């Protein structure tokens, strides 16, 4: 194997998806030398098509791609529609009912990820990032003191390169080959271990206006379906089942998916006149393990994990790209602050890790409560998802995950207190859904009064507001006692001003 020329950068990023392209762009915008290495050639297929407003109007606004996304013609997602809970009727929520995201930014997009991700990666290159595709990263290089100082990668022709950098960022997703080099290990959730079987259909039914662009999530006996409109005719459709029901998605995938569709009357109705796509990037039926996990540490000197390389949580509320880009923003602030000499490394990256763990924990708790409130006592899938059936060890692991979070948000003295709080939140969900389903007019206020929902929206809405208003958003406040605050331009961490 031949060896290429040695190069030096401030930051080298592994992975060109939303987390990698977001972080590299935000760091390059501060004048730093950034190299991004991607193993595939864009555009390429990727799952995760349903986005949240904070990604579009917060992160993407900072990146400068808002107009390009608007011109791409992606369907507008104004909220979600769920057949979930005790009510047999589907219920809707709209982003616009929250004062935090109301107005012209109260929507997101349903995107074809091959197009969306390429927009972000091309933008990174325009903003000064050195982007190299079809490169395979083989290892992280440490110095004598154990600090990450670069990595090795190979070209398509097999030439090996070694690049030096002050920081290595792993943004290569759940299949990362180097995440273990940060130390620690991945801890998997026993609650959210599921399998998804999914494909794409043409000419599926659309919900009536103004909900035609909503994501549709439908619970049924064996699990739940997503139904995501990607254009006026193209729809992403997937069934999520427990790992213990793996037999339902094994064998012939065509028969397996058809059998699951037959189990779910609403999805069967929506696909009655549809045809499954059998060619191109959407022609394959795929199985994915949606196993939720978190790494026990997100950074070490010289190296940081972002996006799915650090953690992943169940996709029912479209949090994947949000967590990926949010973590990239947090890590970019830390990198920018340290590279500019504004903060020491530990102070900056401890803030990144605390905030990212908190956001992951908020969504984990939010989704646990949401699953728990669904009523289907005859279903093995749903009775097994009850919080009170979770193992003590699983709850202890959850407590350990979020124990370092703000005491104003969490009171986690032991596993039993977690059960009580989660049960209370699932009851709040159930009451809110019953209230919404019983009204003639749309009114989502009960849902947004739920403590779990308000916490899940807190940071995303703050990012969105600060990105839109900058210094006019007012002074930021620490998320934790003794914590840092974001600069007015969202690009750095700062010590809070004394009150």
Image: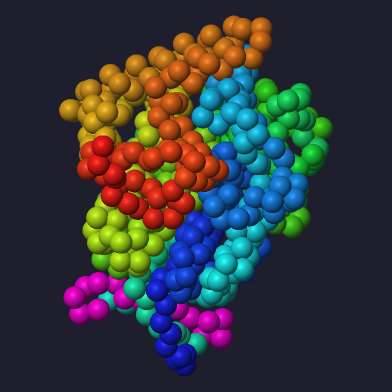
In the rendered image, residue 491, in percent from the top left (x then y), is placed at: 44, 55
In the rendered image, residue 75, in percent from the top left (x then y), is placed at: 72, 40
Residue plotted at (47% across, 90% down): 4
Q: Which of 123 and 416 is in front in this view?
A: 123
Span shown in magenta? 143-158
Q: Tell me the quarter of the image containing the C terminus.
A: top left
| Horizontal arrangement in the rendering, residue 458 relative to residue 230 (left or right) | left
Res 146 quadrant in image: bottom left
Q: Nearer the viewer, residue 202 or 112?
A: 112
In the rendered image, residue 191, in percent from the top left (x then y), is placed at: 37, 34
Q: Which colour scheme is used?
A: rainbow
| Horizontal arrangement in the rendering, residue 195 relative to residue 141 (left or right) | right
In the rendered image, residue 126, in percent from the top left (x then y), is placed at: 61, 68
Residue plotted at (53% across, 25% down): 99
| Horizontal arrangement in the rendering, residue 242 relative to residue 341 (left or right) | right
Residue plotted at (66% across, 7% down): 440
Q: Is residue 153 magenta?
A: yes
Residue plotted at (35% across, 60% down): 337
Res 143 quadrant in image: bottom left
Q: Is residue 184 magenta?
A: no
- In this rendering, does residue 61 appear at all? yes
- The count of marks equals 0
């Amino acid at each position: 194997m031949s060896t290429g020329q040695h190069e030096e950068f401030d930051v080298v990023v592994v992975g060109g998806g939303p987390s990698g392209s977001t972080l590299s762009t935000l760091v390059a915008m501060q004048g730093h030398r950034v190299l991004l290495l991607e193993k595939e050639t864009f555009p390429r297929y990727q799952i995760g098509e349903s986005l949240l407003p904070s990604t579009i109007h917060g992160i993407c606004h900072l990146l400068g791609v808002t107009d390009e996304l608007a011109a791409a013609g992606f369907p507008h997602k104004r909220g979600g529609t769920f057949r979930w809970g005790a009510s047999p009727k589907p219920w809707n929520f709209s982003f616009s009912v929250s004062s935090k995201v109301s107005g012209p930014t109260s929507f997101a997009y349903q995107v074809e990820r091959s197009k969306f991700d390429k927009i972000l990666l091309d933008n990174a290159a325009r903003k000064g990032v050195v982007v190299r595709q079809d490169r395979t990263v083989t290892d992280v290089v440490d110095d004598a003191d154990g600090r990450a100082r670069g990595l090795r990668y190979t070209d398509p022709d097999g030439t090996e390169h070694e690049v030096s950098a002050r920081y290595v960022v792993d943004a290569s997703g759940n299949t990362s080959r180097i995440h273990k080099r940060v130390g620690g290990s991945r801890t998997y959730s026993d609650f959210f271990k599921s399998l998804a079987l999914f494909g794409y259909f043409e000419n599926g039914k659309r919900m009536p206006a103004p909900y035609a662009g909503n994501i549709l999530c439908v619970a049924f006996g064996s699990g739940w379906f997503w139904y995501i409109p990607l254009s006026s005719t193209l729809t992403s459709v997937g069934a999520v089942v427990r790992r213990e029901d793996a037999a339902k998605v094994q064998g012939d995938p065509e028969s397996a998916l058809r059998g699951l569709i037959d189990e779910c009357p609403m999805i069967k109705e929506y696909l009655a006149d549809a045809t499954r796509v059998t060619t191109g990037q959407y022609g394959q039926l795929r199985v994915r393990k949606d196993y939720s996990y978190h790494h026990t540490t997100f950074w070490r000197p010289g190296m940081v994990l972002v996006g799915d390389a650090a953690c992943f949580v169940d996709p029912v509320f479209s949090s994947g790209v949000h967590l990926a880009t949010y973590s990239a923003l947090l890590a970019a602030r830390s990198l920018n602050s340290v590279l500019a000499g504004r903060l020491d490394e530990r102070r900056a990256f401890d803030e990144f890790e605390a905030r990212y763990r908190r956001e992951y924990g908020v969504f984990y708790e939010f989704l646990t409560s949401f699953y728990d409130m669904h009523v289907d006592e005859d279903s093995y899938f749903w009775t097994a998802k009850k919080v009170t059936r979770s193992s003590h060890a699983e709850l202890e692991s959850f407590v350990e995950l979020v124990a370092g979070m703000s005491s104003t948000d969490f009171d986690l003295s032991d596993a039993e207190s977690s059960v009580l709080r989660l049960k209370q939140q699932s009851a709040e969900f159930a009451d809110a859904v019953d209230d919404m389903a019983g009204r003639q007019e749309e009114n989502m206020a009960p849902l947004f009064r739920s403590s779990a929902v308000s916490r899940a929206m807190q940071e995303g809405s703050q990012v969105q507001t600060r990105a839109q208003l900058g210094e006019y958003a007012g002074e930021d406040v620490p998320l934790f006692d003794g914590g840092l605050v974001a600069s007015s331009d969202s690009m750095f961490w700062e010590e809070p001003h004394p009150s």
